[in-house]
């Protein structure tokens, strides 16, 4: 695997991030900002009981934040609170240099050695966890 921070897979995921936009009506809308780098994520969810039935995201941020939101778009629908926690823990695992459970997260492995960029990857997952606090 290349150790380049911006691999083709990450660039493609950022460019083609699924579920971009807003979701109206929604059951939950969360906006988080990273004041240090200027990244901003808005996540809208529609719930079906305890599970995410639909989601959309808007990202104003770097490629890493956009790609991370793409992972959320690909994998969060159908998850409940425990599933969201497991996905977020998997991101933490990758950023600590370990192999992820979710293969799609492997593209973020080079970020592990760039501590200053961890928050860029984590912001969409933090928004996802925040959105599930009420459920």
Image (spheres, rainbow, N blue to C red):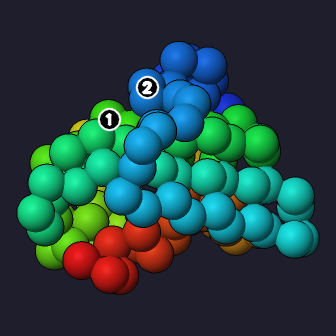
In the picture, the quarter occupied by the N terminus is top left
Above or below residue 69? Residue 18 is above
**Relative to 28, is 62 on the left or the right?**
right
Residue 33 seen in this snapshot: yes
Residue at mark 1: 74
Q: Earlier in the sequence, mark 1 or mark 2?
A: 2
Residue at mark 2: 18
Q: Residue at x 46, y 75 (%)?
A: 130
Q: Residue at x 78, y 68 (%)?
A: 34
| Quarter assignment of residue 77 | top left
Q: Residue 114: horizontal and vertical position, in percent?
A: 70, 62
Q: Secondary structure at mark 1?
A: helix
Tags 1 and 2 in contact by the CB under 8 Å rule?
yes
- The mark tally for this picture is 2
Q: Residue 19: horizontal and vertical position, in percent?
A: 44, 29
Above or below residue 112? Residue 66 is above
In depth, the one of 102 and 23 nearer the eye is: 23
């Amino acid at each position: 695997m290349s150790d380049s921070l911006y691999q083709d897979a990450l660039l493609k995921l950022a460019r083609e991030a699924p579920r971009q936009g807003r979701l109206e009506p929604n059951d939950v809308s969360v906006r988080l900002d990273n004041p240090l780098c200027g990244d901003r994520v808005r996540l809208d969810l529609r719930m079906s009981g305890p599970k995410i039935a639909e989601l959309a995201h808007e990202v104003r941020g770097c490629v890493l934040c956009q790609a991370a939101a793409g992972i959320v778009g690909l994998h969060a629908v159908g998850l409940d609170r425990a599933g969201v926690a497991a996905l977020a823990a998997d991101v933490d695992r990758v950023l600590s240099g370990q192999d992820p459970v979710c293969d799609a997260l492997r593209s973020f492995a080079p970020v592990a050695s760039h501590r200053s960029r961890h928050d860029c990857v984590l912001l969409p997952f933090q928004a996802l966890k925040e959105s599930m606090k009420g459920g």
